[in-house]
Amino acid sequence: MKRASKIYTALIMIFLFAPIAILLVFSFNRAKSLSVFSGFSLYWYRELFRDSETLKAVRNTLILAVSASLISTVMGTAAAVGINKLRNKFLRTALDSVTNIPMINPDIITGISLMLMFVFVGRLFGAATSLSFWTMLIAHITFCLPYVILQVLPKLQQMDKALPEAAMDLGCTPLRAFFKAELPEIMPGVVTGLIMAFTLSLDDFVISYFTAGNGFQTLPIRIYNMTKKTVTPKMYALATIIFFVILTLLLISNLSDDESVRKRREARANKKAAKEAVK
């Protein structure tokens, strides 16, 4: 059984990562072929950095992703703190259900509904164009918020409830107690939520497609438009760069979680040692 489970796990890993490995290898291919590797070359990376339209789309995508992730992290952390302090079980359950809706709802439904809302509001106020960068930003914040809340809320529930009270007993205001006592404890969840929001915004196509204006094109939309003609190997090079960026963010997130676990273990050990010393 052990050998069978190992073989099964290996097959799953191959199935998941073989396409990425092929993409990485052929991004360095000298030729345009995806079936014959004719030699190592950085030609397609040079071609990528000469493509002004693609670089503009990358810049737009990064601006959108950074803006959406930062705003959704601030709003999501504040929302998680508010939900954690609720004592009404019915209201808390209702808020948890509402938070899950954007994650469960299909992207195409979210995209169409947001587009209709933006067009309606735009016409209501007599705007010349209803869709723009700002509508995309609002849409990205909308679907990133639940993921931030679900990353921060468990950290708040794991935190020692006496920490903010102790800080206020020592003279801190509630706001100062949050920044001095609570925020450092939940920071791993905040960082994980920020990274998750950034990657979700970076990757999104469906919602962006329905809420984008004519003058703002993100990278997924740019690649989709290219598929109508042909996708050149410079897109493999771009995908390789994005893959390593996301991999780096994932490693940072895991390291921050490991550091948080280590600190909690040390705190518990110190607390236990202090109790034994008193005895």
Image: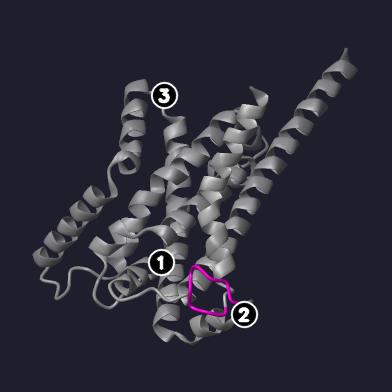
Q: Earlier in the sequence, mark 3 or mark 1?
A: 1
Q: Which label is found at residue 87?
A: 3
Q: Position of residue 194 (x, y in %)?
A: 51, 53
Q: Helix, strand or loop at disc 1?
A: helix
Q: Which residues are magenta?
A: 30-38
State if disc 3 and disc 2 touch (CB < 8 Å).
no
Q: Helix, strand or loop at disc 2?
A: loop
| Quadrant housing the N terminus | top right
Q: Position of residue 204 (x, y in %)?
A: 37, 58
Q: Helix, strand or loop at disc 3?
A: loop
**Residue shown at 35% from the left, 38% from the top:** 99
Q: Which amino acid type corresponds to the residue marked 1 in the rendered image?
A: Leu
Q: Earlier in the sequence, mark 2 or mark 1?
A: 2
Q: Which label is found at residue 41?
A: 2
What residue did someone put label 1 on?
A: 64
Q: Position of residue 27 (x, y in %)?
A: 55, 71
Q: Which amino acid type corresponds to the residue marked 3 in the rendered image?
A: Arg
Q: Is residue 82 left or right of residue 1?
A: left
**Residue shown at 24% from the left, 51% from the top:** 108
Q: Which SS type dominates the magenta stretch?
A: loop
**Residue shown at 41% from the left, 66% from the top:** 64
Q: Which amino acid type corresponds to the residue marked 2 in the rendered image?
A: Ser
**How far, Cα to Cα, is label 2 from label 3?**
61 Å
Q: Is residue 183 left or right of residue 58?
A: right
**How far, Cα to Cα, is label 2 from label 1?**
32 Å
Q: Quadrant of residue 205?
A: bottom left
| Residue 34 on the magenta span | yes
| Quadrant housing the C terminus | top right
Q: Earlier in the sequence, mark 2 or mark 3?
A: 2
**Is residue 3 shown above or below 20?**
above
**Residue shown at 36% from the left, 70% from the top:** 223
